[in-house]
Image (spheres, rainbow, N blue to C red):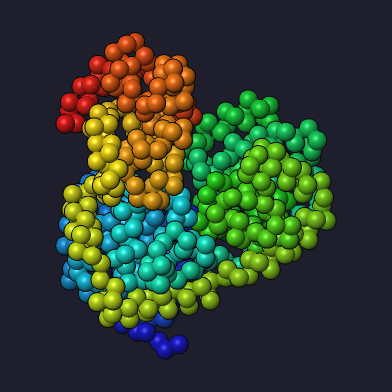
Amino acid sequence: MNNLSGRHLLLFASGQLDSIGGIQRSYQILTDYLIRRGWRITLYGFAKSLPTVPDPTHLAAPLSKEVKVEILPSSIRNSEIFNYIIERVSSLKPDVALVVNSSPRAIPFLSVAHSLDMPLVYSMRGAPEFCLRYLWPCRKVFDLPFKLADAVHLLMPSYQSTLTTKERNKVTTIPSQIEPAKSFSSPELPNADGRYKVIYSGRLSFEKQLHYLIEAFTILANDFPEWDLQIIGNGPLENKLKIQAQESGLGKRVEWLSADNTEAMYELYPQAHLKVLPSEYEGCPMALREAMAHGLPVIAFDTCSGSNEIIEHGVDGLLATAKSPMDGLSNAMRSLMSDPMRRVEMGKRGVEKAACYLPEPINQKWEQLLLFAIDNKRKRPLNAPEENEDKLLEKLAIEGTFASTMVFEKDKYLYKKHREEFLTVYGHRLFDDRYYLETYLDVKVSGQDPLLHYLSEGWRLGCNPSPEFDTRRYQTLYMKGESLCPLVHFYTKGAFEGCFPPQADQLYYAKWPGRKPKTEYSIIDDLSLKLKAN
């Protein structure tokens, strides 16, 4: 491969650059490689505790001094990002822009690159299903980066299934890199204190499902008195999880740690005996592969994206059934905690598997992808987006509404058929389109209007329009066999006859406390909300 001296990469980085994580380490590994190859790199990103132009060696995952880093002000509003960036990069004329972001916050950076006609690579660093369900407001906005980019990066082969055939032609699958291990676990032998450790490392957030791990360990604790649970990381659920562990009677058998860098984690892995990652979703979990590199057997759920493509069940780890998560996880843990030689064999296979993720070949693939985007840019007529996609991208970027704008293709026949019902319900509190699209992902994937789906078929299937309205229960309580959409019944008759909306999903607000309404439901307040919406 020839030296590419003079090539200039403009990198828009997601993640907080003053905290450590898999994505920050991947910037470190890739940029070091590209600098050695002769590239120039300008990086824009976010950090809470760094100056606007920091010393790149002062980042949590330090970068080469040759990387030019600028931090976006923490006070910047969504509507200001586009103009702020474009003023600073319009004179740079980079050879290629790389937008690394799994959320709608990618939109202003994509729009900058598109407006300046730069070759563009879009990198989605999470599982697309997770990103679409929880991060992006609707399918049409989610699709924009894939349609507008000259090349697309995804972490795992199966993730292409979310995209259209045309978009798949631009996709390159590249896993994230891991550093090689320098020391290894002895999963069959106790530590010097005579004890064994189940280890978790990562963010303490809802998608990691750590409550299952604590519950499973509680079930097993009496049968395995020589084992402890070590949880390494931080996040929004830290206090809640600590309370759960305390109330479970585990006491000192659960250890809580924080590791600030890769070196710290690499000192902890060899002291562990089993790695468990109980996530609902992953991208290409670095913590899982790092554990394997150190000779640890691993356990994850069989439905967890990323994990279920890395682990070969029964060979280098176990995939617990998610159909019955508590039984599945506790049974898998029991199987390995009680069998030291099986842990050894799986650990050996894990070391072999982890060798596939070492930096050099992965960095080479990244460089090839960047060059592909430059070449693909020359074929712009073949990749040109539709005019309305250009306009939508620009609108979302300039207005700063990229995180909330919902755009749907309404079926004209269905809308005509249900127009009166649609207008009756639209704007009312008891239809929550965000809840509906997250809960019924197939509707979000299809790009359908969620309210139109509920009115035409969703209520017949028992779908709930919001956490505050249980469709089936309302029918049972108040409708006496009437063939009418229950929510329409409430707003046209029930609310004025003393009917009250039965709660549908108490767990939703536990998961998303910030979305919980500040007041109890009131039809008077709801009618006022409707008037404001109109």
Furthest residue to the bottom? 2
- In the picture, measured across the screen, residue 373 lies left or right of residue 117, that is right
- For the N terminus, the image quarter is bottom left
Residue 215 placement, left or right of 378: right
Residue 506 visible in the snapshot: yes
* Frontmost residue, 243 versus 113: 113
Q: Quadrant of residue 423?
A: top left
Q: Residue at x 52, y 65 (%)?
A: 157
Residue 472 position in % (x across, y down): 47, 25
Report the residue at 22% width, 52% height from top. 396
Q: Is residue 529 above or below residue 389?
A: above
**Residue 124, image x, y percentages:** 41, 60
Residue 484, image quadrant: top left
- Residue 63 seen: no
Q: In percent of the image, x 65 and y 59: which residue is there?
A: 311
Q: Nearer the viewer, residue 107 or 475?
A: 475
Q: Is residue 257 above or below residue 289?
A: above
Query: Residue at image x 40%, y 63%?
Result: 164
Is the C terminus in the top left, top right, bottom left or bottom right quadrant? top left
Q: Which residue is most to the top?
A: 498
Find residue 459 and report its horizontal and vertical position in percent: 41, 32
Q: How many marks?
A: 0
Above or below, 461 against 189 in this view is above
Q: Is residue 260 left or right of residue 340?
A: left
Across and down, in percent, residue 69 comes to 31, 63
Instruction: From the viewer's side, name the closer residue of 189 and 289.
Output: 289
